[in-house]
Amino acid sequence: MADDLTAQLATATLDNNASVQRAQFSNRVPIKSIILRPDGGSGLAGKLARVGGWVKTGRKADKDAFAFLELNDGSCSGNLQVIVEADKGDLGQLVLTGTSLVVDGVLKLPPDGKRQKVELRVEKVIHVGLVDPSKYPLPKTRLPLEFLRDYVHLRSRTNTISAVLRIRDALAYATHTFFHDHGFRYVQTPIITTSDCEGAGEMFQVTTLINEAEKLEKDLIENPPSEADIEAAKLIAKERGIDVAQLKSAKASKQEIGAAVVELQKAKDNLVKLEERSKLQPGIPRKDGKIDYTQDFFGRQAFLTVSGQLQVESYACSLSTVYTFGPTFRAENSHTSRHLAEFWMVEPEIAFAELEDDMNCAEAYVKYLCQSLLDNCREDMEFMADKIDKSCIDRLTMVAKTPFVRITYTEAVELLTEAVKNGKKFENHVEWGIDLASEHERYLTEVRFQKPVIVYNYPKGIKAFYMRLNDDSKTVAAMDVLVPKVGELIGGSQREERYDVIVSRIKEMGLPLEPYEWYLDLRRYGTVKHCGFGLGFERMVLFATGIDNIRDVIPFPRYPGRADL
């Protein structure tokens, strides 16, 4: 029966040209392709299917004659109801939450009045991955997201985290599609860098000096250098020198003399190593009272990148329109719900473009992301609206359809000051020159305008050195895209293309010129106006889902004190 069923599964077709769509690289039918059909799967009734997944809930019925299982394979939020009779397997094991199953069966219409449109009657159990219910940490009851952070390797089995992952995947796909369709080239920028893009100094250092120092200390303890070893090496080198001299005096063959010279050189090399080793001191190497980074792996200080922007600019100045999308890192000892030590950034860069072009691109990109979720991720967004944030779909629709407001930083401060005069209380003081806090940004987007806002022309003192200085010499051509729920979603600017001005800005920020010489070359040789921005990918997921903590929208969150797996 099993062999016949497998053969039928491989060739099963349906009337009216409908068929059970199998996974291309797995002999099973994804649950999504059954229950997310327009008819909910009812049109597949009577057809054979092999499905696999994990049991969400299970219960025995009719005096343990059979069991109802809710099976999920991660392809969608919904579950497929599976009915297993007692003669097909140990029901006591099959009903346990977390059990994995692969089963062959027949799709049937459920009795009238049931919520599901189709169910699977099992003909044979192919595989069972057992679970010990006394140890499995994810019971079928709903668990706080904070609790799940202790089980990052298992939390993707929960409805919320799996939905977040699918939404995140859809946003990543939409990102690549948007930029590809607009002629951008994808550039993979380095994770290890010697440049501080932000100039804030909150960077993770990449070094092998500590490991090498530990190895050296262990070696010096286990094999301490001695004067006796050095004296013995000197004696051997002297003897080998005498051997060479004697052979030359005796007019020995070139071959004999050559072999003796080789032995002499070996003795000298060994002596040098011993003498150098005798001078070694445990600890990290230093020179002139400072750590000697010339002894490090890269021969200089290196860090994990906080942004790929500077590097991707070099490709914008040759390929014109490029973007990078990858992990970035910041060693900021912050425990807020908006900060991670490792996060992902989307950073396009456009040559022959100015600030207005930058704002136009950013607005179009955000709108595209929102519309893409509405069009392609509806089931997961409806789950989020039901379980997490009732307004998330309306928020996506509003952003996708509404023109963004654009105001200068000065106008934004004036609006915030006016709000304070009218009784609005902010925790952070409002005055020209401050870096707008999240509460200010959310007031503008959620209260004052009730739509996304682009704020531009910020004070130069609160922005990075590479942003183009405006004619007033007080502001730079920078812009931030602010959205409801999260505040700043995008930060960008027109880049400073004038060599003298950017050198002055680097010095003004107290940064050394040497690490940026390559960056200055872009201004020395064929400089061009260009602009770009960075979108914090996790912030976009926060905005889309309505989840409150950024640690719950990245697969493996890293933050102070935690770097699991």
Image (spheres, rainbow, N blue to C red):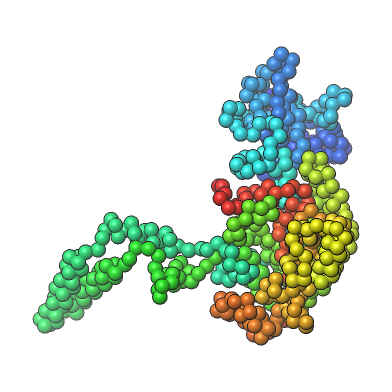
Q: Nearer the viewer, residue 524 or 177?
A: 524
- Image quarter of the N terminus: top right
Q: Quadrant of residue 508?
A: bottom right
Q: Nearer the viewer, residue 310 or 500?
A: 500
Q: Quadrant of residue 309?
A: bottom right
Q: Nearer the viewer, residue 125 or 445?
A: 445
Left or right, residue 184 beside residue 287: right
Residue 145 drawn at (x, y percent): 68, 42
For the point 15% across and 71% down, the residue is: 235
Q: Quadrant of residue 127?
A: top right
For the point 59% across and 76% down, the residue is: 511
Left or right, residue 261 beside residue 558: left
Residue 119 drawn at (x, y percent): 78, 28
Answer whether residue 364 is visible to the viewer in this image.
Answer: no
Q: Number of labelled discs?
A: 0
Tell which residue pokes out farthest to the top in this image: 63
For the point 74% across and 76% down, the residue is: 476
Q: Is residue 395 above or below residue 460?
A: above
Left or right, residue 238 beside residue 523: left
For the point 82% across and 48% down, the residue is: 392
Tell which residue pokes out farthest to the left in this image: 250
Q: Nearer the viewer, residue 390 or 400?
A: 390
Answer whether residue 458 is visible to the viewer in this image.
Answer: yes
Residue 163 drawn at (x, y percent): 73, 44
